[in-house]
């Protein structure tokens, strides 16, 4: 989204090495501001020389703001736009102090909390359309989620794809311990696992589906569509950023610009397809149109109650499966930032 509705295209087999190089090369830079208490009002002025390192998975966010003419509106320096998108990689980057702002779904902050890393959600975009589709391996006769029973399913505990799978299984009345076999993988391994028949089903991002079906549809690979959504597209930041007055001010200034970028991308689909999917990502225009057709309209609420309730349901679902320990969802939201994105966009993008 970021965005996120372009959430993830498949990474190469060298993704892990690439991330390691990114973390080694990028450092969160800029002068350290005075400490900012968690309950203190957000500063409104960004000190000269302040910078943020902002995640730009596959270059999407950086290009989006450039095309929209919004980059020049940032009152701080972007020290780097690391190509870091997957939740576990963002958490590692936060730990390494090489990333200030991540753009993910709702599950990485839950996983971060479970791992003991203090980081909070600072902006919320609600995604009403499914952004992940269940894809079968070639030569599969699976036609519905009910048919997942007895099958091997690609499962990423720390990523949005994992929660989408868990919600679909719950909706279908399938027990994740008795009825299916969860195969632990990361999202960038799903395509390879499907191709090799290592798993019967894996949740793919909508941007991955056209290419996969173009290659393996003739061999019987297909998709299982559901109404299960991954509601949250969020910005989040570690406490090291939120506790730094200068960086917190820069983050507060970034959020309205990010919100406008979401709307610009949605309102300029043809330009985005040409500049990003075709020229940047090497897809065909037809594939780009297929992805855009599945894209959800940005919704940037001025009240986060629905988002917090959704996160609580997700936490409880993960806790029931034994993946995390339960906790109160509001612990991972910093509501000082709650009403920064909404006023930056037109009313029909607020709810």
Image: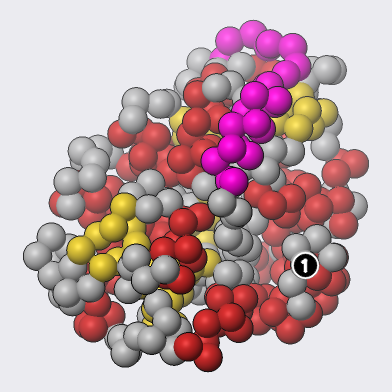
Is there any visible trace of residue 223 in the rendered image? yes
Magenta stretch encompasses residue 220: no
Q: Position of residue 232 (x, y in %)?
A: 48, 56
Q: Nearer the viewer, residue 80 or 33?
A: 80
At 43% across and 51% down in the image, what residue appears?
A: 186
**For residue 144, side relative to residue 273 (left or right):** left
- Which image quarter is the C terminus in? bottom right
**For residue 20, side relative to residue 45 (left or right):** left
Q: Nearer the viewer, residue 230 or 244?
A: 230
Q: Position of residue 121 (x, y in %)?
A: 49, 40
Q: Nearer the viewer, residue 23 or 310?
A: 23
User: Residue 345 lies in what quarter of the image?
Assistant: bottom right
At numbered mark 1, what does the secondary structure look like: helix, strand or loop? loop
- Which image quarter is the N terminus in? bottom right
At 70% across and 25% down in the image, what residue appears?
A: 25
Residue hosting label 1:
282
At 62% across and 28% down in the image, what residue appears?
A: 23
At 52% across and 87% down in the image, what residue appears?
A: 217
Q: Position of residue 58 (x, y in %)?
A: 69, 52
Binning the other alpha carbons within 10 Å of mark 1 as few (below 14), some (14 to 19) or many (20 upward) gives: few
User: Residue 123 lies in what quarter of the image?
Assistant: top right
Residue interval drawn in magenta: 14-36
Q: Nearer the viewer, residue 192 or 36?
A: 192
Q: How is the image coloured?
A: secondary structure
**For residue 212, side relative to residue 148 (left or right):** right
Q: Position of residue 151 (x, y in %)?
A: 23, 73
Seen in the picture, residue 70 relative to 236 is either above or below; the reply is below
- In this view, the residue farthest toward the front is 196
Seen in the picture, residue 269 relative to 20 is either above or below; the reply is below
Is there any visible trace of residue 123 in the rendered image? no
């Amino acid at each position: 989204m970021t965005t996120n509705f372009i959430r993830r295209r498949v990474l190469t087999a060298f993704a892990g090495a690439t991330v390691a190089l990114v973390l080694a090369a990028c450092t969160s830079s800029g002068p350290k501001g005075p400490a900012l208490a968690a309950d203190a009002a957000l500063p409104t002025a960004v000190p000269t020389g302040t910078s943020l390192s902002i995640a730009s998975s596959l270059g999407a966010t950086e290009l989006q703001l450039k095309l929209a003419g919004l980059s020049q509106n940032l009152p701080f320096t972007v020290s780097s736009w690391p190509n870091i998108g997957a939740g576990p990689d963002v958490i590692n980057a936060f730990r390494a102090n090489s990333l200030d702002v991540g753009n993910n779904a709702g599950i990485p902050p839950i996983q971060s909390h479970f791992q003991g890393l203090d980081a909070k959600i600072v902006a919320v975009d609600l995604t009403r359309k499914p952004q992940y589709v269940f894809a079968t391996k070639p030569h599969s006769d699976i036609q519905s989620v009910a048919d997942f029973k007895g099958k091997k399913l690609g499962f990423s505990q720390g990523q949005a794809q994992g929660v989408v799978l868990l919600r679909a299984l719950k909706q279908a009345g399938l027990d994740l311990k008795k009825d299916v076999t969860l195969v632990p993988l990361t999202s960038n391994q799903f395509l390879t696992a499907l191709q090799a028949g290592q798993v019967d089903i894996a949740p793919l991002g909508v941007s991955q589906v056209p290419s996969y079906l173009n290659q393996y549809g003739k061999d019987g690979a297909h998709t299982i569509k559901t109404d299960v959504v991954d509601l949250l597209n969020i910005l989040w930041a570690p406490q090291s950023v939120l506790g730094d007055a200068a960086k917190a001010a820069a983050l507060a200034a970034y959020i309205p610009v990010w919100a406008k970028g979401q709307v610009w991308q949605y309102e300029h689909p043809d330009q985005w397809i040409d500049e990003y999917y075709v020229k940047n990502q090497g897809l065909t225009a037809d594939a780009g149109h297929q992805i855009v057709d599945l894209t959800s309209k940005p919704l940037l609420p001025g009240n986060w109650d629905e988002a917090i309730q959704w996160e609580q349901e997700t936490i409880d679902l993960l806790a029931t499966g034994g993946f995390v320990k339960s906790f109160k969802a509001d612990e991972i939201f910093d509501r000082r930032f709650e009403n920064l994105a909404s006023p930056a966009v037109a009313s029909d993008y607020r709810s």
